[in-house]
Image (cartoon, rainbow, N blue to C red):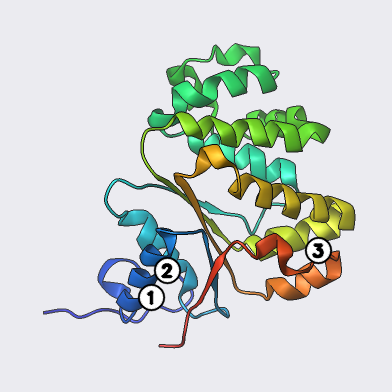
Amino acid sequence: MEGPGFVIGNIAKGKDLWDRQEEIKNIWNALEKSSVLLKAPRRFGKTSIMYDLYTNPKNDIKVIFEDTEGMRDPQDFIARLMLTLLSDKKFWNSIKHWLKKNSKIEEVGFSLAKFEDLINIADFRIKLKESIGKGWQEKGFELISKVKEFQGRILFILDELPLLVQNILRKKGKKTAYDFLHWFRSIRQMPELSHVRWLVGGSIGIEHILGKIGTGTKVINDFHILRVEPF
């Protein structure tokens, strides 16, 4: 019988993900009570663990995976999250009204069939990001609050969140990074979203970035912190 392969650099999937059952079990247990911050150096298999949770959801949990490393600002984050939600038919009815209100692209017609033709068009994503603009905090709150209409538990997995925060700091400055971190914490604390959990991961030390921004660790003190150990 063929055993697990040894994967370096790419995501280890299926039988190639080995020696991580205990970590996966601990994450699911922690998520029952709170959101989780998963910390690990590069090449420790953090993304592979997160991907396994995404592809093998527990019980009735709806899992949404987003890699945030390439994002540069809060508008990127909100637009990408909206597109990911809308690509799932289960969220269409809840999110389409937000899209209609916040998008200037009238030709979508706000039917799922027409939207699926546009979701991967770069111009559409750019226009959506532009329409979010300076009102990203309010529009982001409104978008996330829409998932309260979803029946069942939801887990958002955000890989490389510290890199997103670092990108915001470099591109938009300290104030925007500060505002984003507080906004994101407020999202996690919304009472109407008690059925929602967040699993965020990072391969660089987020505390160092928080020190540069001046928030301290209070913006992440609601996370249950787990560390991925070496194989």
Mark closest to the chain's N terminus, 1 or 3: 1
Q: Residues within 10 Å of mark 1 (few under 14, many from 20)?
A: some
Q: Measure how far apart labels 2 and 1 are at the Cα level.
A: 11 Å
Horizontal arrangement in the rendering, residue 182 relative to residue 149 (left or right) = right
Nearer the observer, disc 2 or disc 1?
Answer: 1
- Above/below status of 29 relative to 8: above
Q: Secondary structure at mark 3?
A: loop
State the residue at coordinates (39%, 77%): 7
Asked which quadrant contains residue 83, the reply is top right
Q: Measure how far apart labels 1 and 3 are at the Cα level.
A: 29 Å
Asked which quadrant contains residue 131, the reply is top right
Q: Disc 1 residue type?
A: Glu
Q: Disc 3 residue type?
A: Thr
Nearer the observer, disc 2 or disc 3?
Answer: 3
Q: Measure how far apart labels 2 and 3 are at the Cα level.
A: 30 Å
Instruction: Give the residue at mark 2.
Output: 48
Horizontal arrangement in the rendering, residue 78 relative to residue 89 (left or right) = right
Q: Is residue 157 visible?
A: yes
Instruction: Give the residue at mark 3.
Output: 215
State the residue at coordinates (76%, 63%): 166
Nearer the observer, disc 1 or disc 3?
Answer: 3
Mark closest to the chain's N terminus, 2 or 3: 2
Q: Secondary structure at mark 2?
A: helix
Please tell me the numbered disc located at residue 23. 1
Q: Position of residue 139 (x, y in %)?
A: 70, 31
Q: Position of residue 52 (x, y in %)?
A: 36, 63
Give the quadrant of the C terminus.
bottom left
